[in-house]
Image (cartoon, rainbow, N blue to C red):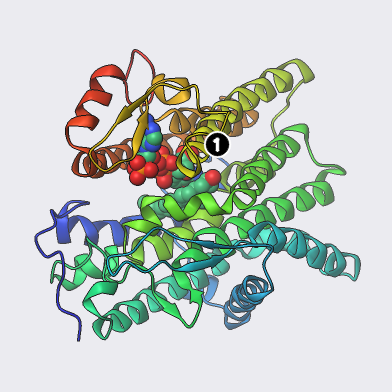
Amino acid sequence: MASPQGSRAPLEFGGPLGAAALMLLLPATMFHLLLVARSGPARLLGPPPYLPGPEVLWSPRLLLLWLTWLGLQAALYLLPARKVAEGLELKDKSRLRYPINGFQALVLTALLVGLAVSAGLPLGALPEVLLPLAFAATLTAFIFSLLLYLKALVAPASALAPGGNSGNPIYDFFLGRELNPRICSFDFKYFCELRPGLIGWVLINLALLMQEAELRGSPSLAMWLVNGFQLLYVGDALWHEEAVLTTMDITHDGFGFMLAFGDLAWVPFTYSLQAQFLLHHPQPLGLPMASVICLIKAVGYYIFRGANSQKNTFRKNPSDPRVAGLETIPTATGRQLLVSGWWGLVRHPNYLGDLIMALAWSLPCGVSHLLPYFYLLYFTALLVHREARDEQQCLQKYGRAWHEYCRRVPYRILPYVY
Ligand SMILES: NC(=O)C1=CN([C@@H]2O[C@H](COP(=O)(O)OP(=O)(O)OC[C@H]3O[C@@H](n4cnc5c(N)ncnc54)[C@H](OP(=O)(O)O)[C@@H]3O)[C@@H](O)[C@H]2O)C=CC1
Ligand SMILES: CC(C)CCC[C@@H](C)[C@H]1CC=C2C3=C(CC[C@@]21C)[C@@]1(C)CC[C@H](O)C[C@@H]1CC3
C-alpha cells in the first residue's frame, strides 16, 4: 500500500478548492467554446447559444469512435520504434525506457486516414459531432483518472509523484498521484501527452478544412494557414518527441485529471478553436496580410525551435560545437546553466516563441471577434503559471546559481517587460 509521499509539498492550483473549481471550470469552458464557435455572434464572453441536453452530448456510437481512436493510437505506439530513449533518473535510481515513434504514428495515421477518405469515409462530417465526441473524451478522462487514482493506491511509495499526494482525495485526483503509471512497458502519461490529443487536434482541423471545401467550394486561405501552422507545431513536437521526457509533466507531475483531461479532451477540442471559428465565420484574407502572418509565425518558430534545440543539445552534450562557445554558470549539482545565446535573452525564450506562434494562429481569424484569441489568452496564463512553477523547481535544484542566473537574465519571458 502506498504511503502519502511528499505530503509536505506545498499545495498548487489553489489547493483542493482550486482543484475542484478547475475540474468543473475546464470542461465547462471547453463546451462553451465549442458552442459559441458555431454560433452567429461567436461571443467569447457572452452566454452559449443553447445548453445541450443529454441527447446531444451522449452518443454510444461516438464513444465507440473515440475509443477506436485511442485504440488505434495505442496500437501505433506499440509498433517497433526507430529508437528507445531513457528518461531521467528516478528516485530509486532506475530509468524508464520510452519508444520514440510519435512522428511515425503521425505519418501512419495520415496514411490510414487518406486511405479511409478515398474509400468514402465522410471526414468532413466530423465537425457536426464535435460536441458528443468532446463529451466522450471528457467522460473517458474522468473514468481514466479514477482508475489511475485507484492504481496509485497499490503503487510503491517510490513510484509516487512529488506533488499530488497531499492526502486530500480531490486535490490528489486532480494532480495525479503516480508519476509514471504503466502496465508493462506501456506508459500512460507519455502516450497521452503526445499522441491521441495532438494527432486528434490536426485531424479535427483537417475535417474542418474539408467541410469548408464542401460548403464553399474550396478551403479559405485563412483555413489553410491555421491548418498549416498547427500541423507544423504538432509535427515538430512529435519529431522532437524525446524532448518531452525532460518536461515537468513527465519528470515532476503525477498523472491525474489535469493531464488526462488536458491531453485527451482540452488539446484536441479547444486548440482547434481557430479552425472551428473559421468554418462558421469565414474571414477574407489577402496575400499581403497572409505574408505578414507567415512572417510572424516564422519568427515565433525560429525562436521556439532555436531555444528548445539549444537547451536540448546543451543538456545532451555541453561540448557539442553548436553550444560549446556559449557562456554558462556552474551549479552545485554539476550541471551548468546557459547564460548567453537564447537563454541569455530571457529565462524562457521558448515560451516567447510559442506565444508569438499562438498570435500567428489567431490572426488569420481577423480582429472582429475575441473568440479566436482565447488560445493566446489561455496560453499566456498557462505559461506564466508554468514559468513560476519551473522557477520554484529550479530554485530548489540550483539555489544560489539560480539566483545568479536571475540577476544576469532579469526578464522571464518578454525582454524588458516581464
Ligand atoms: N502548447 C502548449 O500547450 C504547451 C507548450 N509548451 C511548450 O513545451 C516546451 C517545453 O516547455 P517546459 O516543459 O515548460 O519547459 P522548458 O523546456 O522551458 O524547460 C525548463 C527547464 O529547462 C532547464 N533550464 C532552464 N533554464 C536553463 C538555462 N539557462 N540553461 C540550461 N537549462 C535551463 C531547467 O531544467 P534542467 O536544468 O533540469 O535541465 C528547467 O527546469 C516549450 O517550448 C513550451 O513553450 C509547454 C506547455 C504547454
Ligand atoms: C487543461 C489544463 C489547464 C492544463 C492542461 C495542460 C496540457 C494541455 C499541456 C501540459 C503540457 C503540455 C505540453 C504540450 C501540449 C499541451 C500540454 C499537454 C506540448 C506537447 C505541445 C507541443 C510542444 O512542442 C511540446 C509540449 C510539451 C508540453
Pick out the residue farthest to the top: 416
Determine the secondary structure under disc 1. helix
Crowding around mark 1 (Cα neighbors within 10 Å: few <14, some 14 to 19, many 20+) is: some
| Residue tagged 1 | 309
In the picture, the quarter occupied by the C terminus is: top left
Residue 321 quadrant? top right
- Residue drawn at x 73%, y 20% is 291
Using the rendered image of the protein, determine whether residue 374 is visible from the camera's viewpoint: yes
Q: Of the residues shown, which amino acid type is indicated by label 1?
A: Ser
Image coordinates for residue 385, horizontal then vertical, percent: 29, 40
Image coordinates for residue 351, horizontal then vertical, percent: 44, 33
- Residue drawn at x 32%, y 66% is 93
Please say if 349 is above or below 121.
above
Closer to us: 251 or 323: 323
In the picture, the quarter occupied by the N terminus is: bottom left
Total labels: the figure holds 1
328 on left or right of 118:
left
Pick out the residue farthest to the right: 118
- Residue drawn at x 64%, y 42% is 230
Please say if 217 is above or below 252.
above
Using the rendered image of the protein, determine whether residue 32 is visible from the camera's viewpoint: no
Image coordinates for residue 285, horizontal then vertical, percent: 73, 25
Please say if 174 is above or below 287.
below
Label 1 C-beta lies within 8 Å of the nearest ligand 1 atom: no
Image coordinates for residue 39, horizontal then vertical, percent: 56, 47
Closer to us: 164 or 400: 400
Residue 259 quadrant? bottom left
320 on left or right of 81:
left
Please say if 380 is above or below 72.
above
Residue 218 quadrant? top right
Pick out the residue farthest to the left: 8
